[in-house]
Image (cartoon, grey):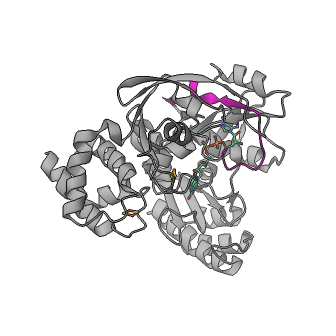
Amino acid sequence: MAVRAYLKPRSPAEALALIEGDERAALVGGGAYLRLASRGYETAVDLCEAGLDYLREESEALRIGAMVTYRRLETDPAARNYCGGLLARCVGNIVGVQVRNIVTVGGTVAGRYAFANLTTALLALGADVVLERGGRKPLEQFLADKALVRDVLVEVVVPAVPQRGAWQDLTRVRADFAVLNAAAVRRGDAVRIAVGARPGAARLAFAAMAAAGAGDASGAGAAAAAELDFGDDLRASAAYRRRVCGTLVARAVEEVLA
Amino acid sequence: MNISLELNGRRADWDVEPGEALLDALRRHGVLSVKRGCDTASCGTCTVLLDGMPVPSCAVPAPRADGRAVTTVEGLPGEAARLGACLAAEGADQCGFCAPGLVVAVVAMSRELADPDEAAINHYLAGNLCRCGGYVSQTRAIRRYLQEAR
Ligand SMILES: Cc1cc2nc3c(=O)[nH]c(=O)nc-3n(C[C@H](O)[C@H](O)[C@H](O)COP(=O)(O)OP(=O)(O)OC[C@H]3O[C@@H](n4cnc5c(N)ncnc54)[C@H](O)[C@@H]3O)c2cc1C
Ligand code: FES
Ligand code: FES
């Protein structure tokens, strides 16, 4: 299927109207994956002029517009200083600056990519997503829904409260997709832990969260390795990932408890 | 569809396919310094500046360049000559395929980072692959270029 029309709506509402009821229309965020996408489309609906490239600091939240790029998470003080630099750290080694200058928060979250570092970090942060039609919902709920996204992701909202964050990932070579990634976020005595690239999609590790809440970092690692399921792919075996999970989660928890 | 962009300081009015990448549009219009290495946003040989920002032109839809400024190595003759001389002096250029994209990325880095050390240079340029294996000599050449530019 060849692209026949390229549109640049001026708002998320306009973008939604363009894709609603048109199976052959696709949204373009960074566009980095659309070219590789197996599902063809005839109408490209580019969000670059829809007013979604904002970062807004509110008293208790940071609102990240869907078109904010990874590079912006690294360079804009509002994102760079957020939660000890967790957002900047989780994307900082992805390919090179060229790619990070185009790939977007919205495209990553909406794509529900299982390997995505950013999604793992956002899950640990307890992020909400805001959809133009579907409204606001927790990221967990958005990720659990397997249906094709026929909506416009407007923004991601993360809590801006006293918290500490830690990032851990393992790659075979620098800039490759992670063999496994993990994030921990502590608020008071509570710790939220997410593990992704298992190679399945990121999940919260509830038993690990309980152990971390009780101050036991290595116990949290062991619990995460036991409670999550892992798979084989060209990067690593399930057994290897399980071992790596225990270590990465323990390190992340140690860092937020310190 | 028609787009108009500023290419290396001059206005260009082009007819592009809605599904084509900026890389394809550039090469079709004779800008052959912009190389197609991987075509999947992984190698950096197709790097151009879009409104001053380095991007992989193989992953930017051509229609997105409408109304914006695109800079390729042709638009950076002074920098290209100086960095090229450093690459030659350090023996960092072999086949040369990666050089145009590397020059564009180094120029972007020199504008963005005040005084990058070796680790910062390697991190900034991680997206520019060279399969002739010249990273050590490339880094030497880039440090020399940055020093001379100061
Ligand atoms: C070479 C390369 C290497 C990479 N390596 C890594 C890696 O190591 N680790 C990692 O975590 N990530 C990696 N990524 C993925 C990257 O970080 C992004 O997640 C990915 O490119 C998608 O972002 P995008 O903005 O390009 O989305 P797009 O390609 O524009 O969109 C992705 C999907 O989401 C839809 N969409 C886009 N925006 C919205 C929106 N606002 N609302 C609803 N739907 C939308 C699109 O229609 C499409 O289906 C890599 C990408 C590339 C190109
Ligand atoms: S050709 Fe664009 S990054 Fe390789
Ligand atoms: S010199 Fe040949 S790819 Fe770099």
Give the number of marks. 0
Indicate left or right for B81 with B13 as reference: left
Query: Where does ligand 3 appear, by image quarter?
Result: bottom left
Q: Is residue A39 magenta?
A: yes
Q: What secondary structure is the magenta-colored segment mainly? A: loop
- Is there any visible trace of residue A56 in the rendered image? yes
Image position of B144 with respect to A226: above or below: above
Q: Is residue A27 magenta?
A: no
Horizontal and vertical percent position of residue B36: 51, 52
Closer to us: A104 or B133: B133
Placement of the N terminus of chain A among the 4 image quadrants: top right
Looking at the rendering, which quadrant does residue B7 occupy?
A: top left
Closer to us: A72 or B80: B80
Image position of B40 with respect to B134: above or below: above
- Is there any visible trace of residue A81 in the rendered image? no
Image position of A3 with respect to B41: above or below: above
Horizontal and vertical percent position of residue A4: 73, 30
Horizontal and vertical percent position of residue A95: 49, 56
User: Looking at the image, which residue is at 77% across and 38% down?
Assistant: A41
User: Looking at the image, which residue is at 54% across and 54% down?
Assistant: A186
Image position of A176 with respect to A110: above or below: below
Placement of the C terminus of chain A among the 4 image quadrants: bottom left
User: Looking at the image, which residue is at 72% across and 63% down?
Assistant: A200
Specify start and end residues of the magenta stretch as a single range. A35-55
User: Looking at the image, which residue is at 79% across and 35% down?
Assistant: A150
Closer to us: A36 or A148: A36
Looking at the rendering, which quadrant does residue B8 occupy?
A: top left
Horizontal and vertical percent position of residue B5: 47, 25
Indicate left or right for A155 with A152 as reference: left
